[in-house]
Amino acid sequence: MRRTVAAIAVLLAVAVSGVVPAQANSLSGLTPGLVPVDAGPAGYFQPTLVPGSTLHAAVVLYGAGSSQTTYLVYPTTALTSPTTGISYGEPQSHPSGPASWVTLSSTKVTLGPGQSDTVGFTVTVPLKTAPGDWVTGIAAQAANPVSVTGTSAGGHGESMVVTVRNIVAIVVRVPGPAAVGMTVGSLALSVQNDQRQIVNVPLAGTGRLLFKPYVAIKVGQCGQSGTMLSLRRQLDEFVPRTSITYPWYLGSTILQAGCYTAVTTISYQGHLVATSSSQFDVSSNQVIVGPSGVTGTKVLHVSSSVWVPVVILLVLVLISGGVFVVWRLRVRNAERVGRHFAE
């Protein structure tokens, strides 16, 4: 796990939107520095706390920019992002889950350029909390959003309001029996912007520990043997007690209308965690048509049963051709031998 710098995510969002920001430097300048005090070797807090106990810790907030700025400091809820990895929620008046365990000495800090302030906090684990990993974080951001102006891909002036922040993670380990766990729901297909198909994979973290799952999926046609399409991928961290729908982007591969089967397995460090079999349908409206009016570059729609007689026929042709060549060589050799003795 890495300390999350949300300013980077904001800048990426601006770039994806097609707006070239004219004040990229002002964005980075308004991102407050946030450094944990006496954190673990990974750069974030990793305390082991029994129910009812309290962690006393602190972070140092550094001012950014060229003028005095007011920053909000708040606990934030940890979630699993749609493509896995940890994401964090927005400020809440009444935090829930592990974020509600955090109490800050200050929630608003005003700093000038180069100034810093230490913000203390406590994390108190409620009684009867189950063993396992509980994830939250402390975030700091400018109190006032920033308006970014720039030029879109079409050359038009655009503007958007963004908020930049910095986050330090807190992973509380409550001792006791705990293990990784996950369930896989029924897969389904969707189409994104009429450009590519997506196989949606519902995943739920049913265990009690953070882990990085390895996913393997095999897709075939209903009633047919063999695999038409497969995925093997190492995913990022998955937060316990959270759920996502993981998107498997098919790219240039296109599934034609019909019924498909999917076998999904989840493993961790070589050990099986979960397996699931399901079916999903592809409608004619979900078959993508490219600019030239034909389907994409790699179309998967021919049943394996169609190829069986074709392959058998090709094999027979090759065998018969080989037999004919061998027969002709033997005939020619026999003719040469006959002429030699005749001379």
Image (cartoon, helix red, strand yellow):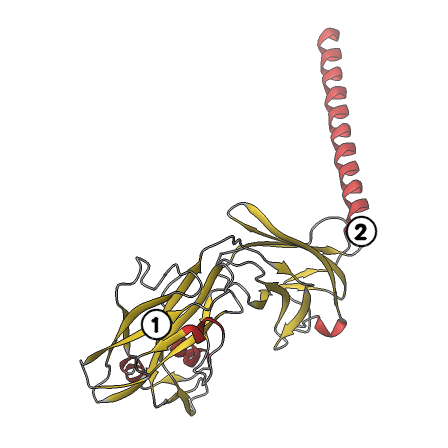
In the displayed structure, would residue 323 be above or below residue 62?
above
Q: Nearer the viewer, residue 102 or 301?
A: 102
Which residue sits at x=34%, y=64%? 45
Report crowding for label 1: few under 14, some 14 to 19, many 20 or more residues within 10 A (C-alpha): some
Q: Of residues 136 and 331, which is closer to you in this image? A: 136
Residue under the point 59% across and 58% down: 182
Q: Which residue is mark 2?
A: 306
- The three-letter code of the residue at mark 2 reads Val
* Residue 330: x %, y % from top left: 74, 20
Q: Quick one: which residue is furthest to the left in this view?
A: 114
Residue 1 percent location from the top left of the image: 40, 61
Horizontal placement of 49 versus 108: left or right? right
The picture quadrant where one finds residue 192 is bottom right
Q: Disc 1 designates what residue?
A: 122
Q: CA distance from mark 2 to mark 1?
A: 66 Å
Q: Position of residue 77 (x, y in %)?
A: 46, 74
